[in-house]
Amino acid sequence: MATIALATALGLPAPTRADTTPDPARVVAQAPAPAITMQQAINTATEAVPGGRVIEIDLDREKGRVIWEALVESSTGRFEIYVDATTGQIVKKERDD
């Protein structure tokens, strides 16, 4: 505390601590372009939910993998479909109630 007060009195900048926690949005933004395009992920997600349509899709990182997260709406409800952005495989499908 005395160090900060002295630094302030002398007109020196206060010491700061850098935040080393990576921002997930920045990590995804810095990742190479996914092998699976958004349109391919939309096609995969709609095939997983017959009669469904994608109403939202985001590129995210989950457990070290880049994933397309698609929200699909159909007459039977809403589903979240997770498509691996490298392989195009569905890694998870869950009802979004």
Image: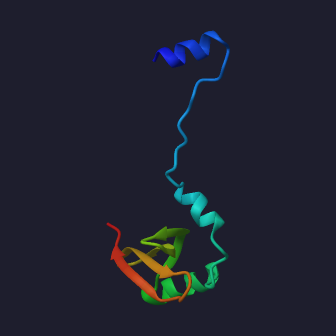
Tell me the quarter of the image containing the N terminus: top left
Residue 57: in sight, yes or no? no
Up the image or down, 88 lies above or below 58; here it is below
Image coordinates of residue 79 in percent, x first then y, are 39, 75
Q: In which quarter of the image is residue 86?
A: bottom right
Residue drawn 50% across and 69% down? 61
Image coloring type: rainbow
Image coordinates of residue 87 in percent, x first then y, are 53, 89
Up the image or down, 47 lies above or below 68; here it is below
Q: As rendered, which of 8 and 72 lies closer to the eye?
A: 8
Tally of marks: 0
Q: As rendered, which of 48 and 41 lies closer to the eye?
A: 41
Residue 64: in sight, yes or no? yes
Q: As rendered, which of 49 and 87 lies closer to the eye?
A: 87
Left or right: 19 with respect to 10?
A: left
Single out the residue that lies furthest toward the top. Answer: 9
Up the image or down, 17 lies above or below 90; here it is above
Up the image or down, 46 lies above or below 62; here it is below
Image coordinates of residue 51 in percent, x first then y, are 46, 86
Q: As rendered, which of 44 and 37 lies closer to the eye?
A: 37
Left or right: 70 with respect to 13?
A: left
Tell me the quarter of the image containing the C terminus: bottom left
Image coordinates of residue 71 in percent, x first then y, are 47, 71
Residue drawn 56% across and 87% down? 43
